[in-house]
Amino acid sequence: MTHSPAAPRPGNEPRATAARPDARVDAPRPDAPRPDARPDGRPDRHDRADAPRFGDPRPVAPGAPAPVRPGATLPAATRPAATRPGASRAGSPRSGGAHTPLGSAAGSGALRRALSTTMLGDVDRLTDRAVDDIRAHSGTYASDAPVTRDDLWEICRDNLLRALEDFGGLAPTGGDFERAARQTGRRRAEQGVPLDTVLQAYRRGGRVLWQVMAEHLRTRAGREADSRDIELDMAGGVWETIDRYSVAMADEYRLAQLELQSRQDTRRVALFEALLDGRADDPAVASAAAAALGIPACDRYVVVVAAQDPAAPPHLAPVLEAQGMWSFWRPRSGRYAGIVRLPRRDTPPGRPAAGPRGSADPAARALLDVLRELTGATAGISPEFERLSHAGRALRLAEQTLRTLPAGSGEVAAFDDRLAQVLLSGRADIAERIVTVHLGPVLATGGERAALLTTLRVWLDHGCSAARAAELLYCHRNTVLNRIGRIAELTGRSSESGEARLGWALALRALPYAGLADAPEPAAGEYEPDGT
């Protein structure tokens, strides 16, 4: 028999349902189950596109319930039983069929446990599939270096095992999932595998896990493929899309980071050069340089200039950083110039610190010792300054200090300890005159000259003590006294005169700058015993 449906209300086309003529239709609740759902969860004919609707002129099949006029009520026998809001039902619009949603309160736990238990029984095959997928999409893992296939397989199996146990709420057999992830992260970091590569492997493994879960769910339902299988496959495609987009985003992110870092480095170097060039008298330049370098505009600073082969630059920054000293270095005209930030000292305000050589200031002493003993560089150190705007002047003083040191000697000196040499190094004519006046006759002695100059230097450097000089020169005390007497005789000056001693000391310091090629500066390490 056929039934002519009543005209529906505009925009309202409920499904056809058998009802008493005097029945009243209550407003359907969003979570109410459809009475026309099949017990096996497969879509009923009313779910199909060809199911009759109100206003549809097509006839209703024999035995089908007649459409209900809007406003009618359902018979008591056909009314759906009341259910708790949010509960899952087979055949509800939310579930789409007989599947129990994983997020439902009723069946999620049981389904998770069943699915996890089933997949754990075949975890080795699941691992093989994940490993093959990861290696197919990653050149790093496919190369077997530094991660071999066996290593990848063991790590994948452990992570899949822990993930399935965690997903199914099963008792862990060897540690929780987070612990496995942390162990993997540490191992890959120690192997030098880039983080992005590790994350991509996790995403690929997760995609395989999802695919296998979808296959098990499909098999568990025992049904033919339908639209829900397409949905599961589409979800797998979403994983693939997200992975490709994530990789593209990460690549561009790294590129942008490198570009930003390059611009920041360029700006930092430019402002550092501005400091050393003396252009920081402008407060804006000094402030910008301090911000770019990440240091205060006012603090304890020195400039260090080191002479080193450009092919083997000194690695000064890490060495100083280990001693608690920040520094920034750049090559300049075959040398390396750096600003060093010294730790704060305990010297009371207004009281100057002693020079580095005999200073009680640990930072100044440490800087000299570290540069001298750990870097092997020949370097000059400027006086300490407070404002970054004074870095240009400090650079010139450090360069002048370096010029007073023998090339390649590995010696390090502070400006304040080389004042006489700095003064004389720029005036060769004055240096030559000082040497001629105070030591001219000694230089003319020929073979006797080297021993006399060496003895005079050691004697002056050690408080004019003949006994101490004799110990260092491996000779008798009287030998020292005889040589000093000989110098006094040649120069016509008394060894007891303070003025004579000052003249001799100044002349010794002026020797390297006097332009006298045959009169090199005696070195303290060249003392030779004569046995007398």
Image (cartoon, rainbow, N blue to C red):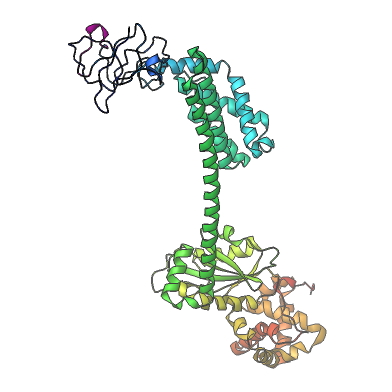
> Taking 78 as reference, is 149 above or below it?
below
Q: Residue at x 68, y 38 (%)?
A: 145
Nearer-the-camera pick, 328 or 34: 34
Nearer-the-camera pick, 115 or 313: 115
Q: Residue furthest right?
A: 447
Residue 89 x/y as whole percent: 35, 15
Left-right relation of 250 to 28: right
The C terminus lies in quadrant = bottom right
Residue 386 x/y as whole percent: 44, 72
Q: Residue furthest left?
A: 22
Residue 390 x/y as whole percent: 48, 76
> Taking 410 as reference, is 121 above or below it?
above
Residue 387 visible: no
Q: Residue at x 60, y 62 (%)?
A: 316
Please tell me whether the stretch drawn in magenta is mainly helix, strand or loop.
loop
The N terminus lies in quadrant = top left
Q: Residue at x 34, y 6 (%)?
A: 63
Left-right relation of 462 to 325: right
Count of numbered tags: 0
Please check the rendered image and state whether residue 385 is part of the magenta-colored stretch, yes or no: no
Residues rendered magenta in the picture: 70-80
Please check the rendered image and state whether residue 76 is part of the magenta-colored stretch, yes or no: yes
> Taking 474 as reference, is 227 above or below it?
above
Residue 233 visible: yes
Q: Residue at x 51, y 65 (%)?
A: 268
Residue 282 x/y as whole percent: 43, 77
